[in-house]
Amino acid sequence: MSKETPLATVPLLARALHRIRSTPPRIIASPPTQPRRAAVALLIRVVPAPNSPLPAPTDNPTTLTQFFAADWVNDPHARPEILYLHRDNTPVSDVSLWQAKLRNTTNEAHVAFPGGRMEADDEGGLYTAMRQTWEEIGIDLAEPCYTCIGQLDDREITTSLGKRLLMILSPFVFLQLTPTAPPPDPVASTALHWTPLASLVSLNANQKWSNVTVDAASRLAPKHSAILKLLVRLFIGSMEFPAIVLQPSPDDSTSIPPSSKSPSKTPHDILEKGIPRSQSKPRQVLKLWGLSLGMTLDLMCNMILPTPSSAAGRPRTRDDSTPSSPLSEVMHLPYQNVEEFRMEYVAPSLASVFPRFSYPDVNFWIWVFGKRYREVVRGWEASVRDGGTNDRRINWSGSALNTFYAAIRKALVVVIVARALGVIFGASFALWWIFS
């Protein structure tokens, strides 16, 4: 098969943004016991081809339809990109929300979207996303060169085992309407990475799936209990989360030119935005995982192509020549059977935040206790098949997360009890053998 040109990505992006604009998101109301909320911005731009004629500046606002009808956007060499960032100094209170705390010896950089927690005087989630983007990376999304496309479904951020709600996260999608925009001004501890969408959704691109290993003790044991942490490491091991190794744009740079930075930073800026990082730090492998991966897949699930009328009413087979999604054959999730877990019916972001454990018996017991989770997934699939769209009245994603976490809790109890009984039995046998 010949190499695909970036032209194929623009129609997919147009389809996704039109669907997001016309589809109301699922809004999750904050319970009285946990009113905290947060918001992030998914910023997309189209980089024009080097020799493409650019449109003349205009004072009239550009509509979404006019944007995707522009010649420079439909140029075969135009490149749609999405913005990620890497924070060197993530506050401890935000570790569970944005990215895992890394060891100094790691060569991984975990990316996220600009955003943060809602303040008491914020007018809403959209205002929070715009304010946090301006404060963190110096991009003013209120400028005429940007437009808010819409909002993706709210997400519940919970503790590691899903027992306690931490906050509600609202993702907002923005589009840069002009070929150029004012340069960003990120804080010194933040690096920006524009990533081509073609590297994520192209049918011929080879997405490099990897994983992020997280110490289970850091998620499941109390922070100040060294003994419990040691027992969790011995009994449960570590957790592995699926991740994608990003391929930033060729002209991407982890450092912003000095001319684009502010001439000086006040002490308030240093305290609020972080300490400048060392300029000699080597380039790291960029990994997209967790909530950021889930929101990225939420965005790309809107790129599903229409099912041909001849194929309606029958399940897809491997003989179908035209896939109904640019993700279905290539960007399938690890740890899932593609035939049983159809991306055309269930958002792949559902499983992107689910871990695998390093001990096989833990995964086995999760599967044993996951009957209810699999029933929820089948109900979600049936809802989409029967109605054509996801039933907005039912929080399928939340139900699936809750049932999956419930299966994890039961599995861990069984594993820990079995390990403890094994240790007691082994110690008893050893004492009997020694003194007999």
Image: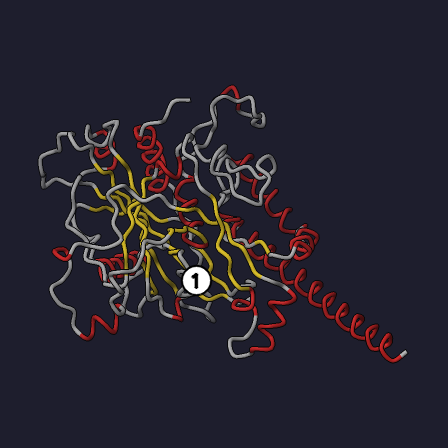
Left or right: where 151 falls relative to 337: left
Left or right: where 379 falls relative to 266: right
Left or right: where 425 falls relative to 405: right
Judge whether residue 249 can be spotted in this image: yes
Q: Residue at x 29, y 57 (%)?
A: 129
Quadrant assignment for the C terminus = bottom right
Give SS at disc 1.
loop
Q: Could you tell me how many numbered marks the image carries?
A: 1
Left or right: where 44 falls relative to 225: left
Q: Position of residue 411 (x, y in %)?
A: 67, 60
Q: Position of residue 346 (x, y in %)?
A: 52, 41
Badge 1 amino acid: Ala
Tell me: residue 136, above or below residue 271. Answer: above
- Residue nearer the viewer, 233 or 382: 233
Tell me: residue 184, above or below residue 52. Answer: below
Tell me: residue 20, above or below residue 425. Answer: above
Question: For the view shown, which residue lies furthest in the right direction?
Answer: 436
Q: Residue at x 36, y 55 (%)?
A: 112
The residue singled out by tag 1 in the image is 100
Q: Quadrant of residue 339?
A: top right
Q: Quadrant of residue 76?
A: top left
Q: Position of residue 385 (x, y in %)?
A: 55, 35
